[in-house]
Image: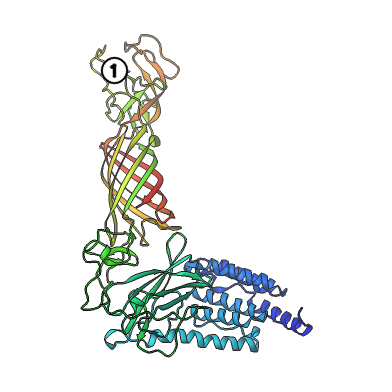
Amino acid sequence: MFSCRSRRGRLAFALTSLLVLGAPAAASAAGERDAEAMKLHNQAMDDDYLSVEFDKAEKKLKVALKKCAKGACTKPVIGKLHIALGTVYGGGDKLDQAKAEFVLALRADPKAALIDALTTTELAQAFKDAQKEAQGARKPADESQGEGGRPAKAAAGDVPHTPVAEQAVNTPVPVYVEIPEEIDASKATVRYKPFGSPKWKSLEMTSMGSGFGAEIPCEDATTTGELRYFVILRDEAGDPVGTAGSMQAPHRVPIKNEIEQEPSLPGQEPPKRCAAKEDCPPGLPGCPEAGGERGDKDWGSACEETVECQSGLVCLNGTCEQGTEGGGGRAASGKGNRNVIGLWGGLDLLLVRGTDYVCSGSDAAYACFYPGSGGKQFYGEPADLPGTNGVKGGLSLGGGRVMLSYDRQLFSSLPLLVGARVGFAFGGSPTSEAEKTQWPDKENPHPQARSFLPLHGELRVTYFLLGDRIVEKGGFRPYGFLSPIGLAQVNASVPVDVCDRRTEDLTPLAGSGSNRCPSNTRFVEDLDAYQITGLNFSAAGAGVVYGITPHFGVSAEVKVMLMWPTLGLVIAPTIGPVFAL
């Protein structure tokens, strides 16, 4: 139960927050999810806090911080959310938790500040303590020395972390990383490099408290000098979601013969010193290399040490990649997924050209068939009359095709792929009956319509835009492509009417015509006039891949095909699943 004085103070505190925090955040448009996060922020402070329902306000602010995971919000918005959550904790007399939130706010945004109208003496003191802690966390990295006495780079990364001040020789080195609430990490790996060793090693960390911890074994702290490390945080799918430090700017721990205070993981005893080893530690200058010959792991394979990878590759961030032993190699754009397999389905939309005399047999690009006859070609002699024996043109569905594709990324640093597609086409034109050999009138024979080619094959060159993966989980990867040469046929039909001078057995007519046709002709309605194109093509187009997992996605594209030598223009929308291996 709150005292009357305490309740009145908190109600006044909440009422003031309505005036100060009620306006929508102007920065909400700066980040992808700023608006959603600030809407929850305002509901928590304006509604729940006004009603002195601190538990509801706390839940809304924590949901907002989760929405800001993986860099979805700007740093000022993250700072405001932590300030608000600290204010809620302060209103509930949880000053230690309030201070912790203020530290996170300052780490996200050094310009974060308390709201003047909501500040109490206790909150102001907690904020001052948080400022000292946040400044102290940055000091060790700024003052550390690199090799040769040169000033070291400040540790990189987007997760705040303070390494232990020092550790004794032959003693495990504790590493603990506290995870901010806006980062959804399910596992962590510490990559470390003992002093004098050319190799980086990996160690899986254990979940503890609100973060992850591990002890670098004493066998990697056998000599005085600096031990370097950085931490990679990953989600359940194995994708990186944050780092504390980096290979180029790692955290550093001095290894000394004597130390003032023994460090430890949270809630645990300091690690015990190990017995000193008399042999030469592997990897130190002048000592033999561990493992001898190089391994047989190919590019993109998981690794712990460079010796596991094939010659010319290095173990970088747990993966065999191209680069140098010093870690200067550029991470490959495919992240190990250099092979892409796809299964596709698409439609063929042929741009039928407008022309006359389509059923006269004089244009090799056209052949006419009786509708529903199963392949009975029209061999008549159409009269030259307006409104007959001609098409206006336009898009017409020519059928569809299913295809299997394979593409390979040629260079690890360039998202350029080459590949091929093979498949089966359906639809097109019907197969003509046996060729007519006896003609009553030899002056106007029709050419035999070619049978439809049901096969598809093409070579492809594809270039992916944006990002560093071919398939990016939860993201879109646009690409463009060229098909310099392919094998296919696309035939599409439009209806056409003719006034035929011949009977169906190809003998001349002697009777009268119909209402639309003159005498000595017969009216033939809705013949299927097929435009015949191919058998080769060249194409270009664009598409996009949406990643469902790091190795599986769905792709959609539009291709424009120029058919040759029998010309035609085809628009082919295509969709299908893709697998990156």
Image-based side of 140 in relation to 90, left or right: left
Would residue 224 be visible to someone looking at this image? yes
Between 301 and 394, the residue placed more toward the observer is 301
Reply above or below: 509 against 530: above
Q: Quadrant of residue 201?
A: bottom left
Residue drawn at (54%, 69%) of the image: 34
Reply above or below: 88 against 355: below
Reply above or below: 67 against 558: below
Between 38 and 561, the residue placed more toward the observer is 38
Secondary element under disc 1, as helix, strand or loop, is: loop
- Identify the image quadrant of the N terminus: bottom right
Q: Quadrant of residue 308?
A: bottom left
Query: How far across and down, in percent of the image, does residue 467 sit?
Result: 37, 62
Image-based side of 95 in relation to 184, left or right: right
Residue under circle 1?
434
Residue drawn at (44%, 69%) of the image: 205
Query: How far across and down, in percent of the image, does residue 448 sit?
Result: 27, 22
Query: How far across and down, in percent of the image, does residue 69 sit?
Result: 50, 67
Residue drawn at (59%, 86%) of the image: 126
Between 557 and 73, the residue placed more toward the observer is 73
Between 444 and 385, the residue placed more toward the observer is 444
Image-based side of 301 in relation to 110, left or right: left
Would residue 357 be visible to someone looking at this image? no
Residue drawn at (62%, 83%) of the image: 95
- Identify residue type, mark 1: Ala
